[in-house]
Image (cartoon, rainbow, N blue to C red):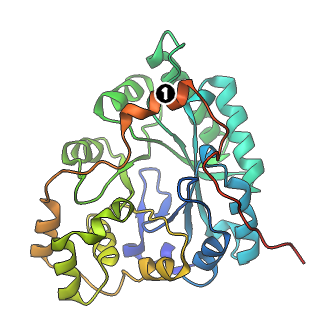
């Protein structure tokens, strides 16, 4: 078994005792999908956590990358998400089954509700969220999924789930980097034993040019991206940086052989909160005016099977 599951620094333990690699590879349709980067991450860099979503349109490509990497399926932590137009008892189960089929797996390690928003036509938003969450609980009972959670949920949204749930969400995946560090939400999740997870840990590259981040990187003789990911790791927050370049994938994985000082962490913990990558105000329109999954993907080149 890969050392990400035996080395305590390289994973977090969810409240149902499932081990989740603390460093993953993010994928999405925004910016494209690189088949070679995913294969390289698994085969050469030791990544064992791949994050995607039905919405991104690349689940089937990831299945091919996993097969090509020759890494055993049971060593890979696969996470995907349910888009709000698929919320509801029957629709969510169908969406889950579809994700399993595209991912080439009869189970998923982590299944998330992608957003707390729902279609505007829904009269009782809270009831729909609760019914959908109950479907995830049933999938968990059936051992079709190993852990269940949410993404982009604030305290008020989590309250809706917690009001009636039988299983407290294992994960809340939200934007997280030094310029968007929701401390109150993190404290809330910790109190409820919900593991906070961060996406866009490099703020889509914007954080790499910050003078403070660059100064800390120079001090440690590391890259800015390694500093940002190490900071997330030392906060015990799983990070899922995305890159379509193999060199960056390798660089992002080399964060387990150095340590930030308390002063470094304090500086990064208290940076000005000035940057939001994912604007919530745009999501409702995307839900109510749906485009095909993966609509932003450019031409994806997948090597032909021998």
Crowding around mark 1 (Cα neighbors within 10 Å: few <14, some 14 to 19, many 20+) is: few
Front residue of this view, candidates 196 and 217:
217
Residue at position x 12%, y 59% in the image: 270
Which residue is the extreme one toward the right?
A: 306
- Quarter of the image with the N terminus is bottom right
Front residue of this view, candidates 220 and 74:
220
Up/down of 161 relative to 303, above or below = above
Up/down of 91 relative to 60, above or below = above
Q: Give the percent coordinates (x, y) of residue 48.
A: 56, 70
Report helix, strand or loop for mark 1: helix
Q: Give the percent coordinates (x, y) of residue 117.
A: 45, 27
* Location of residue 43 (image quadrant): bottom right
**Residue 119 seen in the current view:** yes
Up/down of 260 relative to 173, above or below = below
The residue carrying mark 1 is 285
Front residue of this view, candidates 31 and 117:
31
What count of labels does the image hold?
Answer: 1
Which residue is the extreme one toward the front?
A: 298
Front residue of this view, candidates 284 and 176:
284
* Location of residue 188 (image quadrant): top left
Q: Say left or right for 86 vs 205.
A: right
* Location of residue 197 (image quadrant): bottom left
Q: Give the percent coordinates (x, y) of residue 203.
A: 34, 59
Q: Say left or right for 152 vs 223.
A: right
- Quarter of the image with the C terminus is bottom right
Q: Give the percent coordinates (x, y) of residue 245.
A: 54, 76
Residue at position x 16%, y 61% in the image: 269
**Residue 1 seen in the current view:** no
Residue at position x 43%, y 54% in the image: 14
Up/down of 270 relative to 287, above or below = below
Residue at position x 37%, y 55% in the image: 198
């Amino acid at each position: 078994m890969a050392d990400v599951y035996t080395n305590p620094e390289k994973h977090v333990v969810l409240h149902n005792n499932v081990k989740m690699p603390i460093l993953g590879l993010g994928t999405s349709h925004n910016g494209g999908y690189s088949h070679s980067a995913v294969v390289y991450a698994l085969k050469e860099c030791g990544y064992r956590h791949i994050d995607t979503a039905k919405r991104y349109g690349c689940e089937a490509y990831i299945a091919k990358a996993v097969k090509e990497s020759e890494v055993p399926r049971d060593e890979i932590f696969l996470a995907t998400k349910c888009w709000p137009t698929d919320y509801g008892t029957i629709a969510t189960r169908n969406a889950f089954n579809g994700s399993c089929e595209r991912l080439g797996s009869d189970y998923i390690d982590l299944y998330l509700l992608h957003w707390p928003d729902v279609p505007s036509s829904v009269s009782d938003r809270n009831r729909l969220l609760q019914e959908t969450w109950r479907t995830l609980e049933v999938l968990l009972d059936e051992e079709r999924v190993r852990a269940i959670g949410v993404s982009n949920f604030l305290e008020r949204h989590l309250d809706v789930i917690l009001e009636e749930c039988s299983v407290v969400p294992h994960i809340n995946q939200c934007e997280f980097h030094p310029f968007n560090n929701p401390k109150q939400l993190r404290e809330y999740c910790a109190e409820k034993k919900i593991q906070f997870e961060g996406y866009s840990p490099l703020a889509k590259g914007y954080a790499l040019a910050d003078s403070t981040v660059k100064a800390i990187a120079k001090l440690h003789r590391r890259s800015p991206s390694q500093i940002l990911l190490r900071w997330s790791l030392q906060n015990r927050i799983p990070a899922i940086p995305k890159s379509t370049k193999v060199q960056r994938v390798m660089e992002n994985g080399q964060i387990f052989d150095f340590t930030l000082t308390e002063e470094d962490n304090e500086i990064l913990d208290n940076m000005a909160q000035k940057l939001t990558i994912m604007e919530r105000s745009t999501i409702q329109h995307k839900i109510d005016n749906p485009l095909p999954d993966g609509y932003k993907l450019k031409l994806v080149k997948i090597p032909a099977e021998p």
